Image: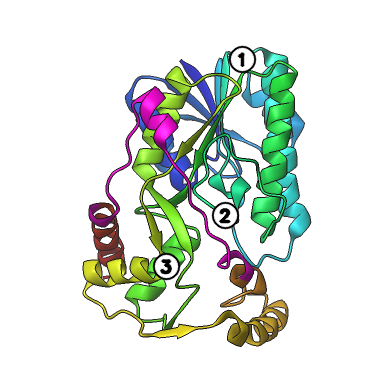
Amino acid sequence: MAILMTGASGFIGKRLALKLLGQGDSIVYLGRRAVAELDRAGAKFISGDITDPTAVARSLEGVNRVYHLAAWFDLGIQDFEKMERINIEGTRNVLTAALGHGVERVVYSSTIGIFHPTKTVVTERSPVSTVHLSHYTRTKTRAHAVALELFGRGCPVVFALPGYVYGPESDGPFGRTVRQFLKGEIPAIVGADQQSSYVHVDDVVEGLVLIDRAGQLGESYLLVGETMNFRDWYRLLAEASGRPVPTLELPFWALYPLATVGEWLSTLRGKPPVVSREALDYLQGDLTGSGARAERELGWHSRALRPGMTETVRWYQQQIG
């Protein structure tokens, strides 16, 4: 199978690409930089960007399957237009080109974040949120709508909606938080009561492959596992690492003035703030869902959170030394 993948250099994408290469598939990946590990495994790198329709079209030559994972997830960013170009217009470019090239199937990695903040445990039939607490969830919700529009025009797309993805090698907010905790740089918990549904990165990879093989076109599949609040999540980190749990829990109102000052200083220093108002907003909404449909229809399963986090923390401890 000849597959184009976007986001192959990312947390989920690299592991997915290696899995598909190991199964004998041919992988072409579009990106701004080559990934040596993928190249050694036999993948073909095409330099380009999903915001460039010409580059996307060039990368689709000879391809019959597409995995679209490329997106920008972060909180407290300043370049809102860049996030829109990547998450929304990039999705439009990839799916429009896939439709024009007549590919057999597109697996689009959306997110449970389109339901954020969740009022209850959401399913694939729940209405998407009309209240957006971050630019990421706003842009991904619009991108999801774009993908549905392209499906209506004939693009053979099927949707994966991962929960809060954790695991080794995260280069996003999850990985930064774990590293800070292990270094003793988190003196207090913020948003202790916020509930999230977690899923291990390798289980997401397995879910994406199953969705490609057996998912119904135009349908969505939530890839989520256990739900836990942030307070218990920190306790789990402490249990796995042997480090103490932060005993101080700070209210949101106490941090907004600090976040405002930090954002102002970050513009002068050219570095992201330690905490942003957007991150504080985001932590005030739950993110909980059910993976029952993927389990029932695809035979997918999510591993238990405790052993998954224990293995993850040990990996980060080895990296930090």
| Marks 3, 1: nearer the viewer | 3
Task: Please state the horizontal and vertical placement of residue 241, each as a whole percent of the image.
Answer: 24, 70
What range of the chain is rendered magenta?
A: 281-307
The quadrant in which residue 134 appears is bottom right
Q: Residue tagged by mark 1?
A: 103
Disc 3 residue type (three-letter): Phe
Q: Residue tagged by mark 3?
A: 230
Q: Would you say residue 18 is visible in this rendering?
A: no
Q: Residue at x 60, y 53 (%)?
A: 116
- In the picture shown, does residue 93 fall above or below 280? above
| Inter-mark Cα distance, 3 to 2 | 17 Å
Task: Please state the horizontal and vertical placement of residue 170, each as a whole percent of the image.
Answer: 43, 55
Task: Please state the horizontal and vertical placement of residue 85, each as a whole percent of the image.
Answer: 75, 46
Disc 1 residue type (three-letter): Val
Taking the image as shown, residue 27 lies to the left or right of residue 30, namely left
The label number, if any, that marks residue 119 in the structure image: 2
- In the picture shown, does residue 225 fall above or below 280? above
Q: Residue at x 71, y 15 (%)?
A: 154
- In the picture shown, does residue 70 fall above or below 178? above
- Please, what secondary structure does the residue beneath circle 1 have? loop
